[in-house]
Image (cartoon, rainbow, N blue to C red):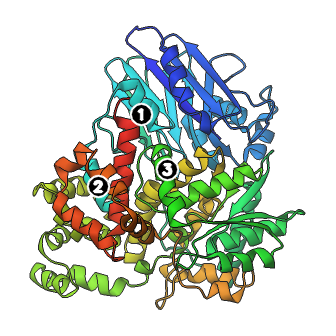
Amino acid sequence: MCGIAGIHRFDGAPPETRALQSMLDRMVHRGPDDQGSFTDGGLTFGIRRLSIIDVKGGHQPIESEDGRYCIVFNGEIYNFLELRADLVGRHTFRTHSDTEVLLHLYEERGPACLADLNGMFAFAVWDRRERELFVARDRLGIKPLFYVAEPGRFAFSSELRSLVELTGRRTIDETAFLMYLLMMYVPAPDCLVEGIRKLPPAHYLKIDRHGRIETRRYWDVERFGDARIDEREARERLLELLRDAIRLQQRSDVPLGIFLSGGLDSGTVVALMAEQVTQPVRTFSVGFEGHLYDERPAARMVAARHGARHRELLLDAKAAIAALPEVAASIDEPVCDSAAVPTLLLSRLAREDGITVILNGTGGDEVFGGYPRYSDQAWRRGLEAMPRGLRRLAGLALGAGGSAQALRLRSPVVDYLCRISGRVDLMSRLLRDPAWTRRLTERLDALLSPIFHDPRLVTAVSRRTYFDLHTYLAGDLLPLLDKMTMAASVEGRVPLLDHRLVEWMFALPDRYRVAGGATKRLFRQAIGDLLPKEVLAIPKRGFGAPVGHWLAEAARESDEPWDRVWKSDEFLRDRIDVTAAAASWTDLRGASGDANLLFGLTLLAEWRRQVLVPA
């Protein structure tokens, strides 16, 4: 687990070694244990290392035996021992690391090696002979990779901020800003900073000696609902895959723990990990006293049942608001998700307790069918099939109107995103530019319609779960987990996103995920004996935080958070109707108003002040 960065000059200019070092210095939190770099001609790349596997011997970069290839690698290859066993007769290993296994695998198979990997990763390989740079990202987008292509230069990094400093690009992309307000994040390949891109999940790119870039997708879910298997066999196979994913993801030379939210997903990780270890599992939970989001009682029941060594963090409004500047500085590219605050503080608690690797339940809802919106498809299909006029009347009857309803009617993609976000009405009141509807819809349709309208998706359940897998999971949940854990120098692992689990679940008919209004049907059946009945009965809530309470408390005490947004940020003042926004802020004092959107604007303003505004 590390931070990687590189600069490839293909215009004859000398290598930018000092610039590279500056980029690495910005990522010390991602790799406080070690650093290394490599230079060949105009190519220079390097790494900040958080030592997890082969702590003493896994120094990077690593070169192949003949010196042709060199690699920098961020992430974990969980099946590296099995891969190494096949390679050992053909290669001389100098370390016990998964990095060297990956290098030799690429040496033999090139990009085809990606199919062999079970893990989370972003890595770069330099081919000295061909003068070619290869960069790849894992299937689901667990590890980040930003890049910028300029005349004569290509640069990449695990973090956006280092590319901002390298290139001087400090302008917010207008359309990405609108996507952020609606979706809470900016989906790849777009980025909030103009001119910088994100390599999408399951993609790789090659840059040749002339600077020509070739980008390809190397993986996708291929089967949808065509598996023929009875329920007993399905339950057994699901448990088998879950147990093996957790077995592999326990491979570590440093202490592991689990973020335990009190829900089914993280509780299952605790239960199955406890089966496989001899020492007590170490669990960490966060609570919010007196609020719906406080899941500590359920977490305690799970921890007690499986003999875990359990620690808790109690977070109040004052501490949460005080943490916002640090969250903004650590989030790298803003994700408007209140879970960022408890995730950062819980990661810090785990690190203080000696934990370097954290497993958690991220991805369970997208893979197993856990969101309520998946179980209510008949009504939605009926609404989408209505003629335009009837759809408008139906939408108005449900409380939507004006420009918000106009946005919903523009496309199925935007309609679905609006229903998820619940914030489009406030957006339509706040934004000054009346052209925002057209600009936002055009970009979202161009970017996301190929996913939403994939011809292989013949049911509403498969369409929405597949869409969420490639958008919300990859754009919000996984970046948030990576940034907040790495800010505390902790590695976050997601066993429920083992690609074998993902592929197998999507191959099952819809009824195994959603049936009769029930979500996670097969998953619940498979884990029924692993968790307390009280936990199994808890309705879906998600891992969040009472951001409305936090901002309401801040609004009652002072206008300081408000002032930081509106009096100091000219970008937002030029685009937001301050009068309408002030009314929403005032509403918070009565515990109403759109807290999530205001939280997102506050986070964006603080991030812009720390990252984009030159010191």
> From what the image shows, is residue 561 above or below residue 153?
below
Question: Which numbered disc, 2 or 1, marks the residue closer to the eye?
Answer: 2
Pointer 3 and pointer 1: residues touching (CB < 8 Å)?
no
Q: Amino acid at mark 1?
A: Tyr
The residue positioned 13% from the left and 70% from the top of the image is 406
Secondary element at tag 2 = helix
Question: Which comes sooner in the sequence, label 2 or label 1?
Answer: 1
Q: Quadrant of the C terminus?
A: top left
Q: Quadrant of the N terminus?
A: top right
> What residue type is disc 2 on?
Met
- Cα–Cα gap, marks 2 and 3: 20 Å
Give the x, y percent position of residue 67: 66, 16
Q: Earlier in the sequence, mark 3 or mark 1?
A: 1
Camera-near label (2 vs 3) is 3
Near mark 3 (Cα within 10 A), the count class, few <14, some 14-19 or many ≥20, is many
Determine whether, in the image, residue 495 is placed left or right of residue 139: right
Residue type indicated by callout 3: Val
The answer to which quarter of the image holds residue 300 is bottom right
Q: Quadrant of residue 597?
A: bottom left
Q: Secondary structure at mark 1?
A: strand
In this view of the protein, can residue 187 be seen by the observer?
no
Q: Measuring 76% from the left and 36% from the top, which residue is drawn there?
A: 97
Numbered tag placed on residue 327 in the rendering: 3
> Is residue 90 placed above or below 324 in the rendered structure?
above
Q: Is residue 199 above or below residue 72?
A: below
Badge 2 crowding class, 10 Å Cα cut-off, few under 14, some 14 to 19, many 20 or more, is many
Q: Which residue is mark 1?
A: 147
Q: State left or right for residue 395 relative to residue 208.
A: left
Point out which mark residue 179 bears: 2
Residue, x 51% and y 23% (percent of image)?
22
Q: Is residue 190 visible?
A: yes
